[in-house]
Each structure stands twice: as C-alpha cells, then as structure tokens.
Amino acid sequence: MGNYNFEAPIIDLLREIEDLSLYADRPETAEKVNRIKEKLNRFRREIFSKLTPWQVTMVARHPQRPYTLDYIERIFTDFTEMHGDRKFADDPAIVGGMANFDGQPVMIIGHQKGRDSKQRIYRNFGMPNPEGYRKALRLMKFAEKFKHPVITMIDTPGAFPGIGAEERGQSEAIAVNLREMARLKIPTVAVVIGEGGSGGALALGVTDRVLMMQYSIYSVISPEGCASILFRDAGKAEDAAQNLHLTSADLMNLGMIDEVIPEPLGGAHSDWDASAGLLKQAIQRNLTETSKMHWNDRTHARYDKFRKMGFFQE
C-alpha cells in the first residue's frame, strides 16, 4: 500500500499511549498520556502541513482511510443497497442504493475497496468492471425517475483493465456514464474521498459539484503509470506525482474542483467520525445550493463547467 515513513513519529507516539493504557490505574499515567497527546498533535501539525504530492498520494491510499461504506454508515440512514446492472452481473467494486440524508431521500453510489486480502479480492481493489458502471448508471436513472438527488463517492485506482472487462465494453460503459451524467435533471454531487484515478473515477464524477477531501488525489493517470510511460521507470512515481498536479490544493487552484473538504488533524484515517462530520457538512451545503436551481439551468451549468476544463487563452 505504500511507504508511510513520514508517519513513523506519529505511530511511535500512538504505541506509547497504547502501552500506557495498561497502567491506567496509576495516578501519574493520565499526566503522561496528556503530555504525549500534546506532542502527538504537534507532530501531526508539522508533518501534515508540508506533505509532498507523493506523500499526499500515500495518505489517499492509506489502508485505514475510511471508504464509501464507512461514510454511508456515519452520514446516511436507512441505506438499502441495490445490486446488478440487469445485463451481466453485480460488481462489488461499486456499491449504491437509496438512503436518507437529513430526512431527504437520496441515491448514494461509490467505489468500495477492501480492508483485508479476502475483501480486496472480492472488491477487485476498488477497480470496477463495465457492469459496475452500468449498475451506477441504472441507479442514477432510478433516482432521476423519482427526482432524488445523487451523491457519488470516488475512490479507485482506475477502471479494471482486464481482458474480460475490455470484451464487455469497458470504455463504452465509461463513455455512456459521462454522457448520461451530463444530462441528469436532478442535483448531483461527487466527492473524491481517496484516490481518483483516470476515467474509472470520472465515470462517477460528472456532477454539479465536485468536492475533494483534503488529502485525496484526482488525476488522469496514477503516478506509477505516468512514470512508466514518460520515464520508462515506475520507480520515478514520486517525480511524476510532483508534475501531475493531483492534490486537492492544485486542482482547486486550476478550477477543476469546487471545494476542498478539510480533514481531521492527521488525515481522515486518524478520526473517521470527525471526517464524516466534515464531509456531511460539505454535502449539505452543496446539495442545498444546487437543489435551488431549475433543472434546465443546472444541466447547462454542469455542461459549461466541464467544457471549460482544459481551455486556455493567452
């Protein structure tokens, strides 16, 4: 999952706190724990205030970072998962279904990775097949029929490049999603919660508002893939990350996204509940704003938003 050496001082302090929990009944323990926590927060502020693009990539891929289902559990109620694309199969790399968001029915769809080896294989490491994108589109059309907003959560290295996926029309499935999402009459909000890779991410990202968690990434290709193509050396991924402008700050400056959602001190993996609370506030705010627009104005604004990307005038 990557090298997290920059987090080593933080991990050491967390272990100290864990070791001291064995002596919680001693009077001096609480004072020691408080001193270590102060040091821990200071280290977190120092380390996370100067992360390089490659280190941000590592945080976005952190194995303990909250995934789509973790956020659904904390932000939404009455989630009912819906399965299958009605053409070939169900794809566990994409989850989706109806839920309540502050009392409002919404459709929530997102990439889902796995925590352990068994789950990672089952979820295909968060890399969808064509049936995953077709399932997502089916759920979006279902939501449009009943005039429910769509919220998507993006967290994938990219679409699965297997032979079977290509045979079943991977590129066509992604292209259809891009076209149909641009036409949806309902309010739509996308959030990059971890890793947003290539067309596999964009297939859930053509929305009225595109948000990014602070330490997530969004790029046309992974740093490793870029390094392999440009430098013929995947080991130069750190150099590629520097030049891809894939961090939330970079993309906000370029006008590619609408908002950066702050993460708890130490990243989303350090406090799932706090991260979910910040994400919920951002979704509420953006969904409220887009819902006030007439559907015709909203679809035109969405179209114009994406047409402007990559356009430069000297």
Image (tube, grey):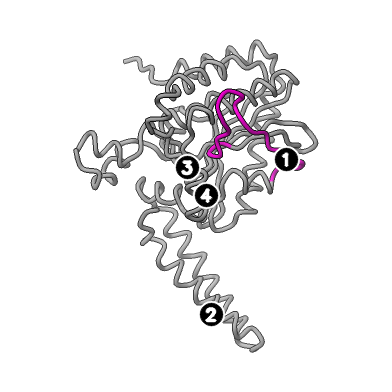
Dot 4 falls on a residue whose secondary structure is: loop
**Residue 233 screen position, x and y as percent:** 20, 42
For the record, the magenta segment spans 75-94
Give me the disc on residue 79.
Answer: 1
In percent of the image, x 56 and y 16: which residue is there? 180
**Residue 287 screen position, x and y as percent:** 67, 29
Dot 2 falls on a residue whose secondary structure is: helix
Q: Amino acid at mark 1?
A: Phe
Residue highlighted by disc 4:
114
Q: Is residue 58 left or right of residue 31?
A: left
Secondary structure predominantly adopted by residues drawn in magenta: loop
Instruction: Quote the CA–CA distance across marks 2 and 1.
Output: 38 Å
Give me the disc on residue 19.
Answer: 2
Q: Amino acid at mark 2?
A: Asp
Instruction: Quote the CA–CA distance across marks 4 and 1.
Output: 19 Å
Q: Is residue 28 above or below residue 96?
A: below
Instruction: Quote the CA–CA distance across marks 2 and 3.
Output: 36 Å
Give me the disc on residue 124.
Answer: 3
Between discs 1 and 3, the one toward the N terminus: 1
